[in-house]
Image (cartoon, helix red, strand yellow):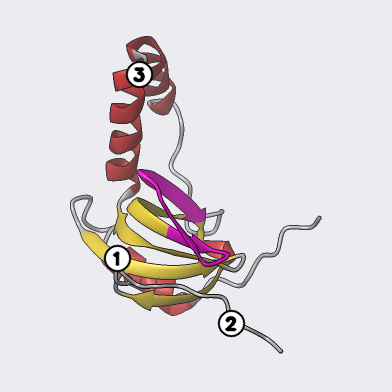
Amino acid sequence: MAEEKHDIDSRLAQLLAQTVRLDPDATIELTVVVDGTIISGSVVSEQAWVQRQNDQIRIGNPAIAAAFDSAASTVQEPTLNEDPYIHFLGPVLVTGGRQVRLQATRVSLRKVSAWSIGRMPADQEWHRPAYE
């Protein structure tokens, strides 16, 4: 099955560039649609996202965390012309009418088909439409 990619929305790229890419401590609430799944949460810089990932790994296995830390020092940052990502902390995924909460995830900016500033309400009830 071929992966569906969309053109990068220039306004979304500009919004991210002006917030989390310029200020590693910045956070913005964002809701996106990727492959029919709604993802809503706090968008942070890649540095903050990597730190959260490393903290989670470190709790489970400090040796693996150390290996990731040393490997990360040799990896170059992707440019916006490559496959950029949106880095979410604490996102909620809505798929098939079910909410799934995650610690951290990232999605390709090229796969975003729709987006909105703000986080969807946590108590939002999601139902699939009933077709007759």
- Chain-order first, disc 2 or disc 1: 1
Q: Which mark is residue 129?
A: 2
Q: Which mark is residue 60?
A: 3
**In which quadrant will I find the N terminus?**
bottom right
Q: Is residue 97 magenta?
A: yes
Amino acid type for the residue under numbered disc 2 = Pro
The magenta span reads 93-107
Residue labelled with disc 1: 122
Can you say whether 101 is above or below 125 in the image? above
Amino acid type for the residue under numbered disc 1 = Ala
| Cα distance in 3D space between marks 2 and 1 | 20 Å
Q: Is residue 132 left or right of residue 75?
A: right
User: Of residues 81 and 53, which is closer to you in this image?
Assistant: 53
- Picture coordinates of residue 107, whole percent (x, y): 50, 55
- Picture coordinates of residue 34, whole percent (x, y): 56, 65
Can you say whether 40 is above or below 125 in the image? above
Amino acid type for the residue under numbered disc 3 = Gly
- Picture coordinates of residue 48, whole percent (x, y): 27, 43
Eye-nearest disc, 2 or 1:
2
Q: Which mark is residue 34?
A: none
